[in-house]
Amino acid sequence: MTALPATSDAGSARAPAGRVFKLLVLLAIIVGIAWVAVTNLGADQAIEQLVNALTRGAIYALIALGYTMVYGIIELINFAHGDMFMVGAFVSLTFLGQILGLEGAVTNIPLLIVLLVATFAFTMSIMALVGVTIERFAYKPLRTAPRLAPLITAIGVSFILQNLVQLVYGPYQTNSPKIFPDTWVIEVGNASIPVLSIFIISVAVVLMFSLQLFIGRTRLGRAMRSTAADRDAAALMGVNINRTIAITFLIGSALAGAAGVVNGLQYGVARFDDGFQAGLKAFTAAVLGGIGNTLGAALGGFIIGFIEVGATAMGYTRWGPAIVFGVLVIVLVFRPAGLLGQQLGERA
Amino acid sequence: MKFARVGVAIAAAAIVVTACGGSGGAGKDLKVGISLPLSGSALASAGPADKGARLAIKDFKLDGYTVAPLVLDHAVNGVHDPQQGAKDMTALIADPAVVGVVGPFNSSVAKVQIPISNEAGLLQCSPANTNPDLTKGDAGKELRAKNPDKINYVRVAATDDIQGPAVATYGIEKLGLKSVAIIDDTETYGKGLADAFSAEWEKLGGTVVGREGAPKGTTDYTAILTKFKDASPDAVFYGGVTATGGGLVRKQMPQVGLGELVYLGGDGIQDGPGSVEGSFINIAGEAAANSFSSVAAIAEYPGKADFNAKYKAEYGEEAGAYSASGYACAQIVLQAIKTAASKGDVTREAVRVAATDPNTTFETVLGPVKFDAVGDTNQRIISLYKADLTAADGVGDWVFDSQVNYGN
Amino acid sequence: MSVVTDLTPQAAGGGRKRALQKTASKHHSWTIVVGMAIVGTLLAVLAYIPPFTLAQPSNAWIDGFTNAGVFVMLALGLNLVVGIAGLLDLGYAAFFAIGAYTYAYVASPFGNSIIGIPIVESLGSNVGGLVFWPMLLVGALVAATFGILLGAPTLRLRGDYLAIVTLGFGEIVPIVFLNSDAVTNGTNGIGGLLRPALPGMGSFSAINPWPYYVTMLVLVTVIMILCYRLVESRLGRAWEAIREDELAAAATGINTVTTKLLAFALGASTAGIAGVFNASKLVTVSPDQFTFIVSFTVLAMVVLGGMGNFWGVAVGAFTIYTINNVLLKTLNEFFDRVSMPILKDINFIELQFLLYGLALVAMMLLRPEGLFPNSRRQRELHTEMDEPGADELMGGDHELEQEDMR
């Protein structure tokens, strides 16, 4: 099974020099892209598009984390995960719109902070619950089934979630209260950077960082890693497999819920079929980064954000998805296990 | 498999209980087929058309005859499916009681349905198809190849080659705009509309500073809008419907700093006041100000208020963008049935002839409608509307602005 | 163990085994023909009796069966790739699209103008349809070529990486068709395709479903026979070997590269045939006919049917198609005509997704190995080749055991 490394050097025996080299290459690529962007677009555009790319990437990354965690531990491509994101978006809009009765921006800063915390807490808890429930009833019974069976089930679950939301909220786009004012901007030269974008990127980074810490430092995290590495051995060591898997789903779904909240703040609408596209991109991100590797998933999410915005900046929005997949294919040709994935030996 | 078996078992039991209804030949019990995509995301746009059509059928009375709707949904997994559309058309044709069809909604489905209905000589009225290739020119002829002299397909929507130029003319001449950036949703309607708009805009001397395509399902337009910002256009044109992004684009424009720009669109975003769920004004909210759209109809057709009231009374919700078109199409089919009945037997051929007669004017909720030799509506009057956020008791609505006559 | 044995025909008893294999194949082919004839007749009869006639008219049933047949063709091909060779392909619709557009280029005025050969013009629409028959082969070949092209980058990939790349191709191909207006007419698609024609009969009709239905039955039969032949050949054994353990397979001398590419190619070719057939029936091709949903639906059919088992897969395809495209859509009409009290008032159209999803989940929870799984175990229990019987009809030995396919 693919390992679920906590940090990027878990299980890898690369020489320090090689790592430094890789870092330099990465730096060179980043500088190169920045240079191309600035010369072609102008500094202001470059900065604004950079922020756009990071914001978009942050949302993809949050969803990708859930995908990669679940895959790492039970080798299931959870096609319903994108819909968890969608349900999260609806939970948050119900909370803000119907339960709290809010409509527009909230400018009182302390109040805004309280509301944000409450929304995240509420949505993430509910989504965690939903995720665990689905795992218990739809995926657990299939743990010993042929591998494609849970895949089909996942899509069945996806359809069910979509239709339920559609029955309640209708097939139209539904408004989600944008409580974070998007008039707050920071001016850098001629470019304006919305504070909301910074907030979203920070939320994503904080959550990712917390996740890495959790997986790397806590007992539960260790349990998850060992279950991902070798389920039977972990069981022999006293790890409660069922509980570990349930917790994985719990965390993954909570992260998807967070992505849903963030989506609502940024775009202000949600629709029952939002999950499919988002899920597809997040899955691509997870694979790009090396499926099973949480850092890779985050990296993949941001990379896809950059590719898409880059495509737009060059006038190729129409070809966006094709370019994303094209890049994926090229990366996989040279690194068949993804960017940060680990080439394990042949498995039977 | 289990479900199919259970279904069959229930059916078998039901047969024992109820007498078989018989095959119901044409005779006096007529049916009007409704072929639309009605599940999933397609429901948002086509659902209102279905409801409108059924309302007209419900209201219809003709001595000695009963007319009932036969609704077939050709959305598969939430999206219109041409293969299913073809199959539904076959099903409608196979039912001898069906003498006319309202639908389809999407041009790609019309392309597969028209050859079938043309061969069978069954009347089809679309409330929403706008692709010119369905009726005009060689492409149109190809579709009718089996019975080239027997037009059976008509539509109440104006074709894209009229609306786009109308909006362009309005923008340049009435609003005095010079440069525009265009987004289309890569679908037949949206892209066709945007192409027609763009061509006319440049012909009139304006400049198109950017053109991007964002397929349905795109939620983030900030990158595209940021790019447009660089070119400082006077306006942004959206080719598509609200459901594929028309409302979202407008909503994100202030976020990127383009909130002051004029927003132009076709009848795809002209979908009712802010109280209608999922409508352009509902989604764009505050940002909807300074938006303009077109409609291929005489402005404020007399029956509008009555129709809206009747619709709301029946369904408990506001009429949607295509409710009136669906109603009008059904009216036309029903009117044709009436004409056929007055002349003798109500057969498919009689109904078809009555509906496609270029000399007949149909009184519909959209106003008087007449079809030309290839089935296109004569309503080539394009009305321009402006979004007014203070209208309709503060929820915002489209308010009539002016009219352009593209009639030949 | 039996895998290794079969690959070295010089092993003891190999000669006799081969002879038995040959009879079994021939036996198989006739079994398939007879089986399909029976199924075809049975379905045709069903379309005319209640309760089926209560849900929709008979012609609609026949037409529906023909559409289901298209999916059966797709499912059989995907079964080669996923079920037999163990390569998880999530973008199968791409080959379907390629077959369809290939036909469009040859059989439509627009297409002809692109390739520069005025076929439609010179042959006319009544006789022009004769090109359909050779195009079936051409479509298969073109799709097979793309199968190799798209399969090539995936050779080094494992399991789910392979899946996402194929999914990527499944997205890329329709996007290319969508955005290349000059060559493909973009979102409007290519229309005016010729319907198939037979000498003496003229071209097929739009309202008479029977010619298409019979053609579909013939095509499915041919494809099924080919599939069985392939699977019982050395190539088939090689596919199963790679599926079970690629390293061991390579160690026994199998060229994994060629074997995998052939899997993609041959799997794609049936999609090509299905594409040509479908295009000739809809007389128009457009990018929105080839979404990911199509790829996924075919995969569900393969899994449901019991991967590896061709008859099973065909039944799975038929079942899912009927549930999704017929049953769920005609519930409204059915309960209306039958006038059942509560059920009559429910609008089943809005519940379609829910019911379909529930059906999928239920089917997987109740029978995750598929409707007709197994056979490897069955084969080991019965002495092989002794009794051509029911299990032969159910399709022999190509199945994944639980927990494999990693």
Image: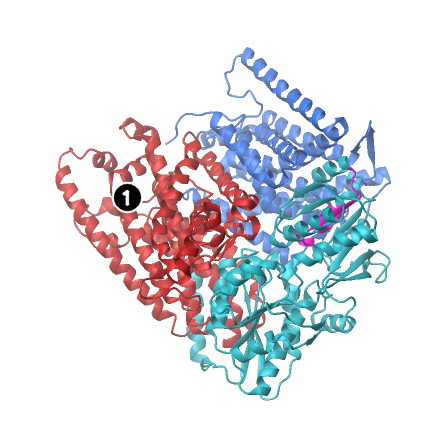
Residue with the mark numbered 1: C231
- The x, y position of residue C304, in whole percent, is 41, 51
Please, which colouring scheme is shown? by chain
Residue B339 drawn in magenta: no
Res C156 → quadrant? top left
Please tell me the colour of chain B.
cyan
Please tell me the colour of chain A.
blue
Q: Is residue C70 left or right of residue B166?
A: left
Give the red chain's letter.
Answer: C
* Subunit that carries the residue with mark 1: C
Q: Is residue C240 left or right of residue C182?
A: left
Residue A103 vs residue B72, the one in the foreground: B72
Residue A289 vs residue B287, the one in the foreground: B287
Q: Which residues are magenta?
A: B232-251
What residue do we see at 57% from left, 60% from top? Answer: B137
- The x, y position of residue C329, in whole percent, is 51, 64
SS class, disc 1: helix
Q: Compared with residue B323, is residue C261 higher up or lower down, i.e. above or below? A: above
